[in-house]
Amino acid sequence: MINTMECAVDAQSLISISLRKIHNSRTQRGGIKLHKNLLVSYVLRNARQLYMSEKYAEIYRMQQYEEVMTVCNEIQELNPLDLAEDCMEQSGDCCGNGGGSEPASLCGALLPASHTAAQSAHIQTATACSAPLSLHAEEVCKEPDTSFYRSCCAEPYPVSNCDFSPANGMHCNKTTVLDLDTHVVTTVENGYLHQDCCAPLQQCCQGAQTPAKKRKVDFGYYVTEPEEVPDFTPCKRARFDDFSCLNSDQLDSSNISNLISIFGSGFTGLVSRQADFEQTLNGQFCSTQALASLGAWTRAIVAF
Amino acid sequence: MAGVGGGGNDVQWCFSQVKGAIDDDVAEADIISTVEFSHSGELLATGDKGGRVVIFQQAPENKSQPQCRSEYNVYSTFQSHEPEFDYLKSLEIEEKINKIRWLPQKNAAQFLLSTNDKTIKLWKISERDKRPEGYNLKEEDGRYRDPSTVTTLRVPVFRPMDLMVEASPRRVFANAHTYHINSISVNSDYETYLSTDDLRINLWHLEITDRSFNIVDIKPANMEELTEVITAAEFHPNQCNTFVYSSSKGTIRLCDMRASALCDKHSKLFEEPEDPSNRSFFSEIISSISDVKFSHSGRYLMTRDYLSVKIWDLNMENRPVETYQVHEYLRSKLCSLYENDCIFDKFECCWNGNDNVVMTGSYNNFFRMFDRAQRRDVTLEASRESSRPRSVLKPRKVCAGGKRKKDEISVDSLDFNKKILHTAWHPQDNIIAVATTNNLYIFQDKPN
């Protein structure tokens, strides 16, 4: 059984190998081979899909675990017997299909920075909703995977409306994570976590006007607006820093920006828009412009 | 014609000849890039990376030893394509010969089409064994005589001379392809042919070089939406309105030119659903079809992808009727093969004369034959070691894992630089031409 990190590293090396191939193909005799580069782009896409899904799973798992451990420690100070009744009542709400204070508390942990005292709010809600947590804490601690996904499902989204009221039928086609270290909120809209979620949701974030909250494009996975891209940095979580360090060590970062612009301009860039290459290499061409017109298989490069 | 090697009535393959340099230092220009028998099988043409075409001719049958088939000797060598430079795109155009296709013989001369990435040429190969002698105004060496010295007149006559084979370019079909040409195919009407690049198929008339008809165009409006390219195409052997083309996604489309001028809509789509248990990073690469060939009968299609050969019945689109694994032991090595670019190798395949046996190449100078009738397959090797005249080729075996038996080769010992991409089968007899990197091996079946 390949563990998560192994998968990610394999995917990562495949990505760097693929990028190198694409880069080398530009100087090959006879011109760029369209067929070969198309096939390489498929590998790039596949590797990226795996890499991203594994990375997110890892990060959320680790973050969730840390959150729960923090709460666990706080709960230990409380008398478990007093909370037993509360647990029974609320257990049904928690981590299931209903909304619940437990998921709400976890949700609270993941609230956007619109809650100014995010951290304090987190602690407060944790205390308030600690009852169900005591029941689930062990589960959560023991099986971070399942509870992660459950809590993911159970989160009422959009989080801006998460006022700890139970929501009916949850689903996340949008995942928002708050980095408690940096208070950076990341919203990811994707299919990966989506697939992992259990309960289908009817009204997920309808009518939810997300307030102006700080948003970072996580790994550029979903490019919302081109203007954001120049500000793009890898997520600044403590754990992410490890990953980014890993990235920069292993990848030839000096070539990445060139490759981003090359690859971002798509096959037209590879095949016919040869003249544009001079501009792309100067970086003028715009990661922005290129990224704004990403095709499915070109998004991969943005990950780096 | 019997089946593949083995016991009993099966064919046993013997070494016949090897052409090309012996030394291991291979000049890149000598790398063989295409092999093709003529329609009668009398001529065998090879093209190489240096843009040269070498044609071998089968010597006339030896009357005293009728069972021993004759050898192939060099008949003609000429430079078909030269390297070019596209100034507009700042691209060098390789002179490598991608494909050769013979035209059926109509008179004393032979004609073939050869193509590189951008230009197709029609070559006439003709023999000259007589020359005129006895000119009045010219000396024998060609110098002109002073007319005042001419005192008598004579009629020039033809005198025999040493056989000279001349190749002259009769047509040049250029500037019709933006992308790299991967196939040419002569129509059964012997008047038209098609040429295929990554995104388009053009129909030409053999007599007309300044225009061609585009019959298939899969270029998307936005190139970033590109998901597949055309990898090969071929005309049906007897229906002049039908052709097929294969794609990098593993599909084959059959088109009827009577249906419309632009054959973007296929008449039939041959596609096998992917086995989800075999899904990997490289699924798209190994499903890309590298060669497609009609059977001589026209009833079946053969396709080659990276790991297998598939036979399709034209009447059944949803799956092939037969699938043969060429080197399934490579499936676990795809990552390394991707790193060293071997996974992009384009293997060709061919039918024997009666469509009972198919052949394709592999690595380590191995090639494989699959007998469809007898459901047997064999792996043979083209090597200098087994190149004693008329020595019988011993079947080879690759050990995929576990204990390696004697005479077996383990997967890790395979030489991936020694690949057989191009093979050809004589249209009537059991004679095969197998191209290693820079050598051409000719094998024949053992005479009884």
Image: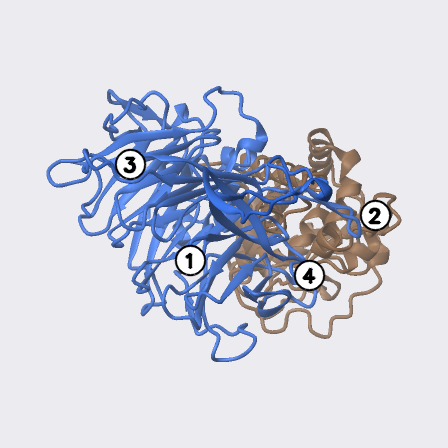
Chain colours: A brown, B blue
Residue tagged 1: B107
- Badge 1 and badge 3 both on one subunit: yes
Task: Name above or below for residue B207 compared with residue B41.
Answer: below
Q: Nearer the viewer, mark 3 or mark 2?
A: 3
Mark sitting earlier along the chain (3/4): 3
Q: Name the side, left or right, on which A67 lies relative to B27.
A: right
- Residue B93 position, x and y percent, is 68, 45
- Crowding at mark 1 (Cα within 10 Å: few <14, some 14-19, many 20+): few
Residue at 34% over, 47% down: B41
- Crowding at mark 3 (Cα within 10 Å: few <14, some 14-19, many 20+): some
Q: Chain letter for mark 1, please.
A: B
| Separation (CA) of disc 2 from disc 1 | 56 Å
Location of residue B62 by image quarter: top left
Residue at 32% over, 34% down: B71
Whether residue B327 appears in this view of the structure is no
Q: Nearer the viewer, mark 1 or mark 3?
A: 1
Q: Viewer-proximal residue, B322 or B242?
A: B242
- Residue A145 position, x and y percent, is 53, 46
Residue tagged 2: A280
Location of residue B370 by image quarter: top left
Q: Viewer-proximal residue, B337 or B129?
A: B129
Q: Name the side, left or right, on which B288 lies relative to B376.
A: right
Q: For the residue labelled by badge 2, is the local secondary structure a helix, a strand or a loop?
A: helix
Mark sitting earlier along the chain (4/1): 1
Q: Chain letter for mark 4, please.
A: B
Q: Amino acid at mark 3?
A: Ser
> For residue B14, which numbered disc appears in the image?
none
| Separation (CA) of disc 1 from disc 3 | 23 Å
Q: Amino acid at mark 2?
A: Thr
- Badge 4 and badge 1 both on one subunit: yes
Furthest residue toward left? B8
- Crowding at mark 4 (Cα within 10 Å: few <14, some 14-19, many 20+): some
